[in-house]
Amino acid sequence: MGKQPTQGQKKTKDQISKAASQRSKQTKKKWTKGRAKDKLNNAVFLDQASYKQIETQLPKMGALITVSTVSDKFKVNGSLARRCIRHFAKSGLLVPAGDQNSKQYIFTVNAQVVAAQKAAAAAAAADKPQAQKKAPAKK
């Protein structure tokens, strides 16, 4: 509310119109737009390098593998993450965790397949002959 006139005084029409025009000239409160979420720039295609990265890193992701975790970790969009999960589940690398729903894929790593892969990698490393070290050159 504006100033009240002192007793015995009345506002004139000019004073009232001037006060009203000053009120309308004041700026109204502007609402903040809030924080805008950054747009993700996720890949929509897989190249050979990213496929190899997903293939090697997926068994190390832990007990819970979902579309959102694959999408976040490997920067791929959701449909590509679903395809990757289905592909690796078909190959036996992932096994379903509990009852499955068509809307939410929940998988875990197949420990037997991972152990077999590690054993194969260790056997390949053992069969590979060690490169002979060169003797340091004398000065």
Image (cartoon, helix red, strand yellow):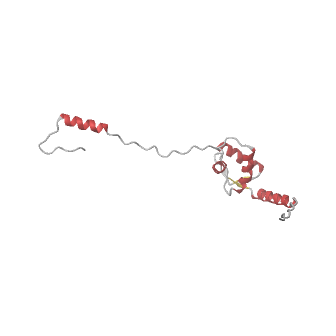
Question: Is residue 77 found left or right of 2 in the rendered image?
Answer: right
Which sits in the foreground, 56 or 112? 56
Task: Please provide percent x and percent y for residue 115.
Answer: 78, 59
State the residue lying farthest toward the left.
8
Instruction: List x then y, in percent, for residue 124.
Output: 85, 58
Q: Nearer the viewer, residue 53 or 18?
A: 18
In this rendering, position of residue 97 left or right of residue 8: right
Residue 111, picture quadrant: bottom right
- List x then y, in percent, for residue 123: 85, 60
Give the quarter of the image for residue 5: top left
Question: Going by the image, does 15 lie left or right of 108?
Answer: left
Which residue is at the front of the view, 92 or 135? 135
Locate residue 14: give its quadrant. top left
Could you tell me which residue is drawn at 71 percent across and 57 percent down? 60
| Quadrant into which the N terminus falls | top left
How far from the left and from the top, in percent, is residue 77?
A: 65, 44
Q: Please, is residue 138 above or below residue 17 in the view?
A: below
State the residue at coordinates (74%, 56%): 110
The answer to whether 30 is drawn above or below residue 59 in the figure is above
* The C terminus sits in image quarter: bottom right
Looking at the image, residue 58 lies above or below residue 5: below
Task: Count how many numbered circles sit on residues in the image.
Answer: 0
Residue situated furthest front in the rendering: 139
